[in-house]
Amino acid sequence: MAEQQQFYILLGNLMSPDNDIRKQSEEAYDTIPGQTKITFLLQAIRDAACAEEVKTMAAVLLRRLLSSSFEEIYPGLTVDMQMAIKTELVTSIQTEASPNIRKKVADIAAELCRNLLDDDGNNQWPELLKFLFDSVNSDNVGLREAALHIFWNFPGIFGNQQQHYMEVIKRMLVQCMQDQENPQIRTLAARAAASFVLSNEGNTALLKHFSDLLPGILQAVNESCYQGDDSVLKSLVEIADTAPKYLRPNLEATLQLSLKLCADTTLTNMQRQLALEVIVTLSETAAAMLRKHTAIVASIPQMLAMMVDLEEDEDWSMADELEDDDFDSNAVAGESALDRMACGLGGKMVLPMIKQHIMTMLQNPDWKYRHAGLMALSAIGEGCHQQMEAILNEIVSFLLLFCQDPHPRVRYAACNAIGQMATDFAPTFQKKFHDKVISALLQTMEDQTNPRVQAHAAAALINFTEDCPKSLLIPYLDSLVQHLHVIMVAKLQELIQKGTKLVLEQVVTSIASVADTAEEKFVPYYDLFMPSLKHIVENAVQKELRLLRGKTIECISLIGLAVGKDKFMPDASAVMQLLLKTQTDFNDLEDDDPQISYMISAWARMCKILGKEFQQYLPVVMGPLMKTASIKPEVALLDTQDMENMSEDDGWEFVNLGDQQSFGIKTAGLEEKATACQMLVCYAKELKEGFVEYTEQVVKLMVPLLKFYFHDDILFMGVLITSAESMPLLLECARVRGPDYLTQMWHFMCDALIKAIGTEPDSDVLSEIMHSFAKCIELMGEGCLNNEHFEELGGILKGKLEEHFKNQELRQAKRQDEDYDEGMEETLQDEDENDVYILTKVSDILHSVFSSYKEQVLPWFEQLLQLIVQLVCPSRPWADRQWGLCIFDDVVEHCSPSSFKYAELFLRAMALSLCDTSPEVRQAAAYGVGVMAQYGGENYRPFCTEALPTLLGVIQSPDSKVKENVNATENCISAVGKVMRFRPECANVNEILPHWLSWLPLNEDKEEAVHTFDFLCDLIESNNPIVLGPDNANLPKIFQIIAEGVANESVKSEDACSKRLANVIRQVQGSGGLWTQCVAMLNETQQKAIQDLLNTA
C-alpha cells in the first residue's frame, strides 16, 4: 500500500510545473520495472479515491507503455496476469463514472488489442469483440461511446474476421449515426465510420459497400461544427486526402457542404479553413474527378473573400521587424488554398474562373480588395503558368500601375506580385519587361515614408535579378548601382540616428544579387560599396543587428566571388580577419543566430575565391561547421492522442503512418544543417586532397543521414541529396592517403548506399543516391563490391525494373479511368518522366559495374537480362528502348567478346532502332554499332557490314542536321568512322571517306568528336591520299575542320588527339605557300582557334 501511495506522489510530480521535480520524477519512473508499472498504473486507474488528473496521467502512461514497450513487457507476463489486465480494462470501462477517464481506458484497450492481433490477423482478445457488440447495443450511452471510441481508435480490430462481420459493422455504424437522442453518439459513429473507411482505403469493393454511410458522415460534419467540435470535419479532410474516390457518389453534396461552412462567418476561422481544406485537398488528390463538378467554381470567390479579411494597422508601413505570416489568418489560408488549387486543377480551369474576379477586385475603392486581388495574382502563377504566359503583357501592364497606388499595402502587394512573377515566369518575364519593371521597382524603392514598401520593392528586385540573364542587366547597371548606393548611404545614416534597419537588410541583399548576376562587370563599382559593407560588419555587433550583419557578410562574399580573385585580393585578408573574429565569437552565438548560416555560406564562397590558399583556415572553420551539420532533429513516434497536444506552430511536422499513429519531426535547425552539409560538399569539391584531414569525420556524419526516412520536409530531402552527393567527392579527397585508407572508407559507405537505393521512397533523393553510387564504383574500380553486395544490388535493381513495368501498367489503367482527362494525362506524363529518370540511374549503375568488372560480371547480370530484353521490345515507349539499348551498348563495349552469347537477344532490336522515329533511340543504336566495330570482336563483323548502309541513309536524309536529330546523326557519323577504322573489311572505305570528311566536325557530341579526330589524325599521319587530296588540295578544308572543332571545344587541350592535330598544323606551317593558303580560308574565330591549339598543345 505504501508503495502505491509513493507511486501516486510520483504521478503527481510527473505533472509538476517545476522542471527539476518533473525531470527527477521521469528518471525515477523510468527505473520501475515494466510489470510493476502496469500493476501500479492499473490500480491508480481503478482507485475511486484517486484524483482525476492523477488517474488521467496513469491512463496516458499505461497507453504509452503498451504502445512503445509491448514486446519487451507483455509476453513476459504470466497468462493469469495477462488475463487480469484484459478483465481489469473491460471492468474499468463498464464501471468508470468519469467520461474522460472512460475514454482514456478505451484508448488503452484499443492499444492493447492492436498489439494482440497476430501476423495472420487473429485477434487474441476475442472477449473485447464481444464487449464491443454488447456495448453498442446497450442502453448505457457511456458504454456505446466507449465501444465506438475503441472502434474509431483501432478500426482493424476484427482482423481476419472483418469480411465475416461486414454487415454487422455496417449495421452498427448506421444504427449509431441515426441515434436521434444522443448527438455525441452520432458524432462518434461518423468518426468511427471515417476511420474504418481510411483503414480500408485500398479496398474498392468495401468503399463502394459503405458509400451509403457518407450522407450520415456529412450530416455529422454539419451538426458537430455548430456544436464547436471539428473532429468529424478533420476526418472528412483525411478522407479527401487518402480515399477521395469514396466521396465520388456524394461529391456534389460534399462540395456544397464545404462551401456552406467555409462561407459561414459565425464559425471559427479554423473551422472555415478546414472546410476549405476539404475542397483544396480534393483538387490535389482527385483533380480529374473535381474538374467535372461545377460547384467547384463557387470555391474561388470564397477563397478571395477570405483573402480580404485583413485588419487596418496604422503602424504597418513603419514596422522595422518583419513578423512571420500569421498562418491562422483567413487571408494567408485563402492565398495558400488558391495556390494549391491552381496547381491541382491546372490553369486551364482556374484562370478563366478567377480572371474576372481579380479584375473586379483590382478596381474596388477599398484597398483590402485591391490587395487581395494582387496577392491572388501572385498565388496562381505557378499553377496557371502556361495560360498566364500567353497574356503576360496584359497582366504586367496592369500590375505596374499598382506600384503607384495611394495605399502602401497595395503597393507592397504589387511588389509581391512582381517578385513572384519574376520567379514563376523567369527568364521570359525578365526578357520582356526589364525596362518597365526595373524603373518601377527603383521608383518604389524611393518611398522613404513607407520603409516596409521600400524593403519589399528591394526584395522584388532581388527576385528579378536572380533569374535575369547577365546581358539584359548590364545596360541598367549604372542606374541600379547609383540608386542602391544612394539608398544604402541614406539607410546607414538612419541606422545610426534611429536604429532602423529593415530596408538596409534588403538593400544589402539587392546589391549582392546584382553583383552575383553582373559578375566581372561589377568590378568598376567594387570600391563604391566595399568600404561601407566592411564598416557594417565591423560595427553592427548588437543583437538586434544580427540579421543585417549576416546579410552583409553574404553580400561581401558574393561580391568577392563576382569580381574575382585579382580585384578582391587586396581586401581578402581584412575580410578573412573580420570573418575569423566572428568565428572566434561563434561559440558565444545562440543556436538560432541568423549569422551562423550566412557565415557558413560565406566561408564556402571564400574557399571558391581563394582556392588552395583557403586550406590554412580549415582548422578554424570546421569546428562550428561540423557542429551545425551534426544538429540532430527531435523525432517522435506518436499516436493521435499525443499529437493533439503538440502543435505544428512549435516547429513540429507530422507524417501519418496510418493506424492512428504519426511520425513527428521538429524542424528547428534543419535549414542550418542543410546549408552546413552543402558547404562540406563545397570544401571537398574545391580543396580535394587538401580536405583529407576531415574526410573521416565528414563521412561518419554523412553516411548515417542516408538512413533517415522523414520525407515530407523539403529541407531534409536537401540534406539527403547532399549526403549522397558527398560520397564520391570524399573518396576523391581520401585517395591521397593510399588504397587501404580509401577501401576502409568505401566499406563504411557501401552498405548504406546499397540499402538506401533499396528503401528510398522519394525519386529525387533516390536518383541522387544511385548516381552517387555509380560514381563511387567507377572511382573504386574492380573488387569494390563483395558477393553479398552483388546479391543485394542484383535484387534491388531487379525490383526497380519490375516496378518500372508495373508503374507503366498502372498508368495505362488510369487512362481508362472514368475521370481521365488531359489534366490527368499531364500528371501521368510527369510520373512517367520520373520513372524514366530512375531507369537512367539503373543504367548508370550497370555502366559503372560493367566498366569496372568487365566480362566476369556477366553471370550476375543474367538475373536482369530478360527485363532488359523487355525494355527493347518494339512495343515499349521510346525511352525504355533507348535505355535498354544503352545497357546492351555497355555490355558490348566492356564485356566482349563474351557479349556475343546474348547477341540474338538484342541485335535485331538494334538494327530496327537505327531508323527509329525517335532520335534518342537512333543515337543509342548508332553508338552500339560503333562499339561493336571497336570492341565487339570478329563475331560482330556481319552486323557491322549490314548496318553500314542504314547509317549512311540516316546521315544523308534531308532533316538529319535539324536540332532534334543532330545528336543521333553525329553518333551515326562517328559509328561509320569506327567501322572504317576498326573493321575496314566491312566497308568500301575509299568510297565512303570523302563523304565522311564532308560531315566533319561534330559539334554537339563532344565525346564522339574526339573519336572522329583520332581517326582523322590516323589518316593524315598515314598520308591517306583520299583525305589529303591530290597535291594536298584538301588541307585547307582539314584546317577548317580542326579550327571549327577547337572553336566549338569539341577538342580540348587535355585530349590526346590535340597534340597530334597541332603537329599536323606545325608541319604545314613550315611549308610557306601552303600555310598561307590554308590560313586565308579561315575566318577570325577559326584563326584564333588554330593559334590557341598551337599555344596549348
Image (spheres, rainbow, N blue to C red):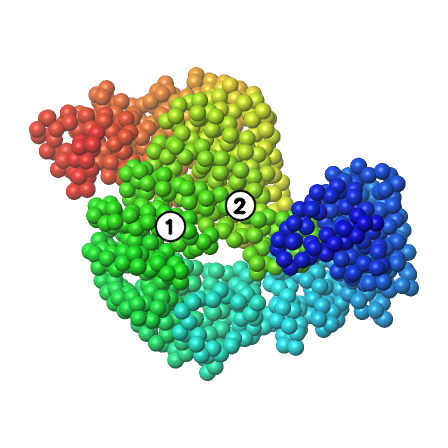
Name the element at disc 1: loop
Q: Is residue 209 left or right of residue 469?
A: right
Q: Nearer the viewer, mark 1 or mark 2?
A: 1
User: Residue at 36% of width from left, 39% of height from top?
Assistant: 619
Q: Which residue is mark 1?
A: 585
Residue closest to the eye, 92 or 845: 92
Going by the numbered disc 1, the residue's amino acid type is Asp
User: Residue at 78% of width from left, 61% of height from top?
Assistant: 52
Q: Is residue 828 left or right of residue 995?
A: right
User: Residue at 52% of width from left, 75% of height from top?
Assistant: 310
Q: Quadrant of residue 546?
A: bottom left
Circle 1 residues within 10 Å: few <14, some 14–19, many ≥20: few
Going by the numbered disc 2, the residue's amino acid type is Lys
Residue 31 shows in the view: yes
Name the element at disc 2: loop
Q: Is residue 873 left or right of residue 592?
A: right
Circle 2 residues within 10 Å: few <14, some 14–19, many ≥20: few
* Whether residue 902 is situated above or below residue 615 in the rendered picture: above
x then y, percent, for residue 214? 76, 62
- N-terminal of the two: label 1 or label 2? 1
* Whether residue 455 is situated above or below residue 473 in the rendered picture: below
x then y, percent, for residue 953? 39, 34
Residue 107 shows in the view: no
Residue closest to the eye, 817 or 794: 794
Disc number at residue 632?
Answer: 2
Residue closest to the eye, 495 or 785: 495
